Amino acid sequence: MEKMKANTTKVDFQKIFPFLGLAAVLIFFGAFSGGRLFTAQNLKAVLNDGLYIIVGASGYAFLFAMGILDFSIGANMAVSCAVACLAAKINPWLALPAALLTGMLISGILGLVHVKAHVDAFITTLAGQFILNGLVLIVLDNSVQQAPLEMLKWYTLPLKLVILIGCMVAGYLMLEHGVYGKTGKLIGSCPEAARQTGINVGRHKLAAFVIMGALVGLLGFVSLIRTGTASSKTGSTLMMNVLNAALLGGLPMSGGPTTKFRGVIVGSLTMAFLTSGMTLMGYNVNTQQIVKGLIFLIAISISFDRKNMKVIK
């Protein structure tokens, strides 16, 4: 009876942990920033940063549901942005399709290696990250490329809201109510059981990679119209921010039915306000990375399912 009570307490804590984390960040930085965290100007900055995190985490949720980790998303975003920039110099309207196709192609290839060659996603995407980090330098000719200045006018509040709301609504409906989302959770829970029911596990995994690639490509385009440039540093913080958002939101690394889309929203908001709060308090980029690394260790120690040691599939 005592063991059952302890397990119940642990599960309950894991459910409320994401909300406690968000509340702690809001209270701490709200107080120590003198209320600047909630000013209109800072909330605009939170929206800009949160856009990347929420869109990235929305796609990552489908990978997480199947117990898959993709370490290539930041490098993929950099390559997608670089290709979009080159396409924009031919015609600005080619930038978006170029970014989307590039992101989908890269993730699709990595997904095929994982599915067809049976190489763990961890190894596949980590190797992909190294390759893409070199590829982006080749595409950019070891320099920072500038997009046509007229594209900066595209980065408007309505566009940001459409992208943000569209990704959240589509992600929620697909993951929580769609057949694909429910199938993905079944695969994450037990791939062999999914195969026994006639599910094409490889095809569903490949689709998750392609979805992630499309969203990463979209972020590459957004980065291009926001900054007007493409560089090898584009997307350098995306991986850490998205992975931390997923873990702080309570998404289990082992996948399965406990993967909930609300975790994407809560975790992304936590990371966006955390980043903004540290910036307001004068923390430089290096210090912020140290803090985020420590948060990653804390979050994974709380969310890690020790009954299922194999978290990379």
Image (tube, grey):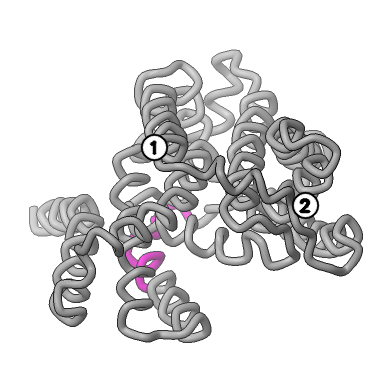
Query: In the figure, 153 relative to 44: above or below?
Result: above
Residue 237 horizontal/vertical position (percent): 56, 65
Q: Position of residue 218 (x, y in %)?
A: 61, 39
The residue depicted at 54 percent of the width and 24 percent of the height is 194
Left/right placement of residue 199 relative to residue 24 reads: right
The residue carrying mark 2 is 82
- Discs 1, 2 touching: Cβ within 8 Å: no
Does the magenta-highlighted stretch encompass residue 300? yes
Q: Amino acid at mark 2?
A: Ala
The residue at which mark 1 appears reads as: 161
Q: Residue at x 32, y 64 (%)?
A: 302
Residue 195 seen anywhere in this rendered image of the structure:
yes
Image coords of residue 203 (percent x, y): 68, 24
Question: What span is in magenta?
Answer: 298-308
- Relative vertical location of residue 94 with respect to residue 297 in this rendering, above or below: above
Inspect this view and state whether residue 111 appears.
no
Label 1 SS: helix
From this viewpoint, which residue is outermost toward the top? 198
Q: Is residue 193 left or right of residue 301?
A: right
Q: Residues within 10 Å of mark 2 (few under 14, many from 20)?
A: many
